[in-house]
Image (cartoon, rainbow, N blue to C red):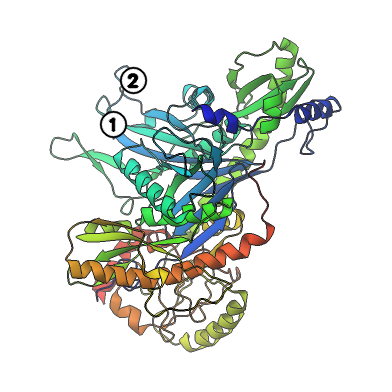
Amino acid sequence: MEDRTDGRNANQLRPLGCSRNILNRAHGSARWSQGNTIVLAAVYGPKSGTKKGENPEKASFEVIWKPKTGQIGKQEREYEMILKRTLQSICLVNVHPNTTTSVIVQVVGDDGSLLPCAINASCAALVDAGIPMKHLAVSISCGLMEEGSIILDLTKSEEEKLKAFAYLVFPNSPLSVIDKVHSSKEEPIEHGIITSVSYGAMPVSGYFDCLERGRAASAAISEFLRRSLQKQSSDDASRAAQ
Amino acid sequence: MEQRWANTSRLTINEKQFIEEALRSEIRVDGRRLYDYRRLTIKFGREDGSSEVQLGETHVMAFVTGQLMQPYRDRPNEGTLAIFTEFSPMADPSFEPGRPGEAAIELGRVIDRGLRESRAVDMESLCVVAGKSVWAIRVDLHIIDNGGNLIDAANIAALAALSTFRRPECSVGGDDNQEIIVHDPEVRDPIPLTIHHFPIAVTFAFFQEGNTLVIDPHYKEEAVSGVRMTVTVNSNGDVCTIQKAGGEGILSGDVMRCLRIASLKASEMTTKIKEAVETYNAEVALKKVKRHPSLIAKKITVPDVEMKEASFQKTKELSADMENSPNQTSTSLTTTKDRDTNASIGRPLNWDPYSSSAPAIVSSSTLPELVGTSKDANEDQMMQTDEEYDPNLKKDQIASATGVSSGIHKQNSPPKSLKDAVKPKHKRKKNAERGAR
């Protein structure tokens, strides 16, 4: 297996960093960094009312993506749409009907895997804001090399060179106080996949390899996410009232 | 959207009266005196020309980028400077995405007048080929958190970012001597901008028909006050901009008083900014210190305190072994700026997938010859290495960190890619050495 430009091996992730509750005005905020890719996410909500096309029986989400420099273009709109659908599927939308929760994503640094980083940051920010969710989501990028091997957590140069890569979002397994009766027929929840965005042409077997690898890595990320969220939860206070 | 009005945080009558009453006795809600600034923190990002400023609760980020463009027709031998302000909806529930509102445009204009029209940044040095190609500098200001007094904070962020921005060196050459060659920053050091003076914006808020005035208003004070005035002065005492848009009238004597207070504050602020920039530049220069090409350091995240002690012992043993090694071990230099960024924002948790076993300690070196790397091949520790790094060396070497006089710095920030750690201009040296071997 050839060495990657920064010396990691194929299954290695860049160092992760997560800090919560960093902004004063926002109801929830989080900063997620994967190597040099850093994303800041803030959550306001729930606010009353929904936009015109949205279903008023459910809570709706609004995502605003702010790039580091430059104007907002189609790429940003695509990211907003993907993020919105992902977040809508992990949150409990029936708890607060006819409300809008705004998620604002600010790109601080971009070195590849920008969308996975943003999804992870938004998830942490939603937890910081106290929005009711079914489970957390963890996201990872997987690339397919020519000889069929998979590499994880791509940098920008790798994304540009690879023929095909995918961003995958997996659910985080919920920790329950109640012992689950494990039905052997049922697949555990982590085996589902919430979102998948693929770029470039890859064979079907390659895609399934990506899924396997990504799922395995998502366990590590969700462990980190859980630890970092638990650590800071001691001095939480409801800020939606301010 | 109509429903947004219901969501804007409006001051209650109680709060309003409390703030006004307190100000009558010259007490401010956060305990400051009338002419005190809030705590100012200036941090720099990983790339040149990015800064993050925190003034109390207000949080602003600035990014400076440059591009080669055609100059304006009436100024063919000057570069251009453009300021773009983004009032991000994350800063305040009442900020809407889309078209900038009045406040955003006003902020952009005040900073623009202070920086560009007062000729703070030298434009003529940005000219490459007169009439054809000049550098267009673009400053993007992102307001992340609105705690009040956005103009001052954004101004400081813009100045800090401009001071640390480096543009690539370019020369005119080619066949017809008209072609512009932009040199790679790794080949030739990029050049900083020439900043003649630092225009500092100082915002005043007036209460009770101009009887009380405060500096650096909090957002609640801003909502209560009817009048605001921003004065941009530099440490030489020059007035660059005065902005007072509407509101009640202020006596001219009060305006003069404000100008005097502002010039005092401006010199303090200029010193603070310059100190922060100096510290950052010193760190960057420290990173550029000569390294041995054999082993390049990689910063390892050390998650637990306990592990550090253990690994310190381990590296001490290793260093004893390594004394005889012909390939000198070196110490990598830590970048504190990255660590600071993480440390002062909330309480970050860094997790390094590499450090399953005890990682080595990375220490900073003041001796120019010693270049550091910490790697423990035995423990199968993963490290990020430079693209120039010779893969053969990686497997053979066992490196250790050598303690140096400046002490051991524990690296808490995630390892950056080698592009940041090593100034790549030394690639030439490494290649030459490797060729010689």
Dot 1 or dot 2, earlier in sequence:
1
SS of the residue under disc 1: strand
In this view, the residue farthest toward the right is: B25
Chain containing mark 2? B
Q: Residue at x 22, y 59 (%)?
A: A161
Q: Quadrant of residue B297?
A: bottom left
User: In front here: A51 or B222?
Assistant: A51
Q: Which residue is mark 1?
A: B69
Chain containing mark 1? B
Name the mark nearer the viewer: 1 or 2: 1
Q: Quadrant of residue A9?
A: bottom left
The local crowd at label 1, few if under 14, some if 14 to 19, many if 20 or more residues have their Cα within 10 Å, is some
Q: Quadrant of residue A201?
A: bottom left
Which amino acid type is marked by label 2?
A: Arg
Q: Residue at x 31, y 43 (%)?
A: A75
Q: Which residue is mark 2?
A: B75
Which amino acid type is marked by label 1?
A: Met
Q: Is residue B160 visible?
A: yes
Q: Taking A202 as reference, is B210 above or below it?
A: above
Is B253 left or right of B73, judged from the image as shown? right
| Position in image of residue B275 (x %, y %) | 60, 45
Q: Taking A191 as reference, is A46 above or below it?
A: above
Is B130 left or right of B92, judged from the image as shown? left
Q: Residue at x 69, y 57 (%)?
A: A235
Callout 1 and callout 2 share a chain: yes
In this view, the residue farthest toward the left is: B175
Q: Is residue B47 visible?
A: no
